[in-house]
Image (tube, grey):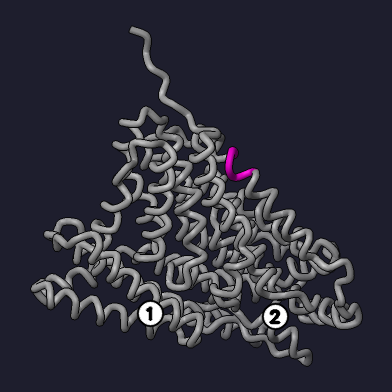
Amino acid sequence: MQQQKLVNIHPIEACVVTILMLVGIGTSIIKLELVPHIPVSIAILFLLVYGVLKRVKLKDLESALVDGARSGAGAVLIFFFIGMLISSWMASGTIPTFIFLAFETISGKWFYALVFVITAAIGLGIGSSLTTAATIGTAFISISGAFEMSSAITAGAIVSGAFFGDKMSPLSDTTTLASSTAKVDLFEHIKNMAWTTIPAFLIALSFFSILSPADSGMHYREVNQIKQELVEMNLVHWYSLIPFGILVVLALKKIPAIFTLGSSAFSALIISLVTTDKEKWSELPTILYSGFQPDTKIAVVDSLLSRGGIESMLFSISLVLLALSMGGLLFRLGILPAVISLLIKGVEKTSVLVFSTAASAIGINFLIGEQYLSIILTGNTFESYFQKAGLHPKNLSRILEDAGTVINPLVPWSVCGVFLAGVLNVPTAEYAFFSFFCLASPVLTILAGFLNISITKVEKNPA
């Protein structure tokens, strides 16, 4: 994608095209409630026509589409394995055991705050926001239904906690990517992020505490019926938590994500031989594709456990590939570089530099829908400007996370937004308003730039 000759267009023209496209997509998804595939596909057609008018060869436009989609190959493979992980964790009792334990320990009071804190702790431990949301998050979404809580606020708490953990964990790939892009020591990067991350955590915790009802309104009789049914289904055991333990251990050892997810799913499949009747063993491999489908007398339990499988990821995968293809066109047509060029003007002032860097990371998330590219492109573009301003590169790496990593789940057509909406069964546009940690992080990092708080200068060597 980057090796092709880019179209040279005026930044104002690029902004007009971008605004038209984003307004069209946003209106279609939020107001018209269309599935995101349709407006994104229309946007691609719009960009193809624009490219033809700019006299770009059709072959080059096709290559841009393919190159954009190719950049998501890693995410697609992870989606496949997470789909298998969820269904195998259901069959082995891993997620049902978490649900049972949560029913035992969590009440309606402080519910959203507890979901946020627990999800943050687990995300910090395993370093993966998507895995955290797809496993523990799925359990909490199930519980929120039984407690008659808001699924949108619960999803917001899950996303906030998962991305706090992802952002601050030394095991996280985005944390490593941001520090390496800005050429900063990993742990120095994490320590510096505390200036904005801890306040954002406390702000989010305050909101979730306020929103948590004093009276849960839950029906204890129904909750007890669910717990009893899970036990009778032979899905609540201490050994059902072994796959989770394997996931944590391999994550701590920094084993690649696909191998980690695959190993955990395989161990869960082995354990499911114990939790499943022998005459149904032949059906177990099938759940890896079609998902876990329990047969119970309680409808709510069926709803709680009917999840996972490769098939459940196909909606997300198809949208991710379309969105990334759109990103490939935006880059090839010179639209993205032209918009970024506007942000570079006037960056001699620290506050403007910080704001421009954050705006770039946020904008790339909305235009391309890929958090890795928001980190890499923004980091590479603004690195020299931070050097000229005499600012330590850890300022840059922090902004890349505050305005790049945590914004991706708030974009309905982004990799994370699509995935989370699928596994949590809550539209991105609904939970985004309650993802307080993700919303507070970029505001705080921009505010730090304007107030010159926690902005570190490069120490000059004495002559």
Disc 2 residue type?
Leu
Q: Is residue 460 visible?
A: yes
Is residue 210 rendered to the left or right of residue 446?
right
Q: Position of residue 81 (x, y in %)?
A: 48, 68
Placement of 194 over or under 339, stated as above or below? above
Q: Position of residue 115 (x, y in %)?
A: 72, 61
Which residue: 11% across, 74% down? 59
Which residue: 44% across, 40% down? 351
Residue named by callout 2: 304
Q: Which quadrant of the figure contains the N terminus? A: bottom left
Is residue 215 rendered to the left or right of residue 116?
right
Residue named by callout 1: 24
Say few, some or many: other residues with alpha carbon within 10 Å of mark 1 (under 14 / 14 to 19 / 20 or more): some
Viewer-side label of 1, 2:
1
Placement of 219 over or under 324, stated as above or below? below
* Start-end of magenta stretch: 194-198
Cα–Cα gap, marks 1 and 2: 35 Å
Secondary structure under tag 2 reads helix
Disc 1 residue type?
Gly
Q: 313 or 422: which is nearer to us?
A: 422
